[in-house]
Image (spheres, grey):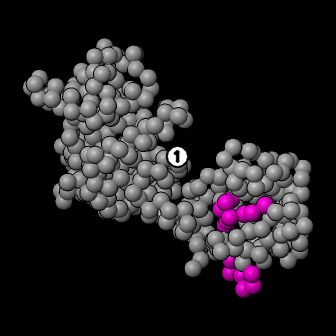
């Protein structure tokens, strides 16, 4: 079992409120991701679950037992940090079994548990090596293996892939997904990378300024973000957020707004539209726009555009070959209004 409940949890450092009241039910066997910008409180929340930070107010319940005052070793949680923190003078097997040795587990049982973890992580051939002989991805797998041998109720991951290069991060995301499917253990994963959040999580909790802005499945957050903050944080390239035009705004701005919303939009303050829902056409069609930069990525192109009167640049993501344009050109924009998101003055999604 690995059910975790956060009930009104708060954390303050002196007069500074870092976590301002979190209620969250994490299901047994779920892969829960905490995502948000630096300083939003996601890592602090994870450290409170682990017992590395005290809880100022509220309750932490693990499998029905209040865990606020339990020693970290008694909570049934194992944490994997951003830093591998491996002992350089120990082999992979010794690093993985060290916590068991300190707990008084006999050598035969240690070797059995370490061997099983190595099989799961596909690193049996590395058990005799030292950390200096391993790649970054292999070292992170050792750190994960060190957690696996403890057979925890809950795995806690604090940005474990941030020190790896892009290719290794992709490989490790695949490994973590496979590991979760094989073990079936509850996993709570902290990251600032929304791609990791979208690809790994059963559900995602988006943190902002010490509270959870929205909780939901990845595609739910992408397609129906509750606020402008969530809309802007989830998705790459970023969503286009278009302000309501003033009465004397340039014609292009007003035309774009009308195509997105039509009539009866007085209460809408801003409209969001994902880059893939903004089509590029000839200059004679749609809303006139000026190409500032065209990034041709092979499978697709990201076109950065300026529309007269619209604050900032708009981004369009198109399949490669459908928008053969370059900086300095004037093109037409055809927004797919069916996918537009209307936000009110409070920054929340309107029904």
In this view, the residue farthest toward the front is: 321
Q: Which of the 4 image quarters holds residue 109?
A: top left
Indicate whether 103 appears above or below 263: above
In the picture, measured across the screen, residue 136 lies left or right of residue 187, that is right
Residue 203: % across, % down: 41, 59
Q: Say if the magenta span includes residue 264.
A: yes
Q: Say if the magenta span includes residue 150.
A: no
Residue 155: % across, % down: 30, 44
Indicate whether 295 appears above or below 243: above
Please give the residue where the numbered disc 1 appears in the rendered image. 193
Residue drawn at (35%, 58%) of the image: 9
Residue 313: % across, % down: 77, 55
Whether residue 48 can be seen here? no
Q: Quadrant of the N terminus?
A: bottom left
In the picture, measured across the screen, residue 327 lies left or right of residue 18, that is right
Q: Quadrant of the C terminus?
A: bottom right
Q: Which of the 4 image quarters holds residue 251?
A: bottom right
Residue drawn at (47%, 51%) of the image: 199
Which stretch is magenta?
262-280
């Amino acid at each position: 079992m690995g059910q975790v409940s956060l009930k009104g949890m708060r954390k303050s450092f002196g007069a500074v409120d870092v976590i301002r009241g979190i209620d969250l039910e994490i299901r047994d066997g779920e892969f829960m991701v905490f995502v948000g910008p630096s300083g939003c409180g996601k890592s602090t929340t994870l450290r409170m679950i682990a017992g590395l930070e005290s809880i100022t107010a509220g309750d932490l319940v693990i499998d029905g037992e209040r865990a606020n005052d339990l020693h970290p070793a008694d909570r049934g949680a194992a944490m994997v940090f951003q830093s591998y923190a491996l002992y350089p003078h120990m082999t992979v097997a010794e690093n993985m079994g060290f916590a068991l040795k300190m707990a008084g587990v006999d050598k035969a049982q240690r070797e059995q548990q370490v061997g099983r973890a190595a099989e799961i992580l596909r690193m049996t051939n590395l058990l005799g090596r030292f950390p200096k002989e391993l790649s970054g991805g292999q070292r992170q797998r050792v750190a994960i293996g060190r957690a696996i041998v403890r057979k925890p109720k809950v795995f806690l991951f604090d940005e474990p892939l941030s020190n790896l290069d892009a290719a290794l991060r992709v490989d490790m995301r695949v490994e973590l997904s496979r590991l979760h499917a094989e073990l079936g253990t509850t996993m709570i994963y902290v990251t600032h990378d929304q791609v990791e959040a979208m690809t790994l999580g059963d559900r995602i909790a988006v943190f902002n300024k010490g509270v959870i802005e929205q909780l939901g499945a990845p595609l739910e957050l992408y397609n129906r973000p509750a606020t402008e903050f969530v809309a802007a944080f989830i998705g790459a390239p970023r969503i286009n957020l278009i302000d309501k035009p003033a009465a004397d705004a340039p014609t292009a701005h007003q035309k774009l707004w009308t195509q997105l919303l039509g009539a009866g939009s007085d209460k809408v303050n801003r409209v969001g539209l994902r880059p893939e829902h903004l089509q590029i056409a000839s200059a004679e069609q749609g809303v006139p726009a000026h190409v500032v930069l065209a990034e041709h990525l092979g499978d697709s192109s990201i076109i950065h555009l300026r529309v007269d009167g619209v604050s900032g640049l708009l981004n369009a993501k198109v399949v490669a070959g459908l928008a053969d344009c370059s900086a300095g050109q004037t093109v037409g924009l055809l927004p797919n209004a069916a996918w537009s998101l209307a936000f009110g003055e409070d920054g929340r999604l309107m029904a």
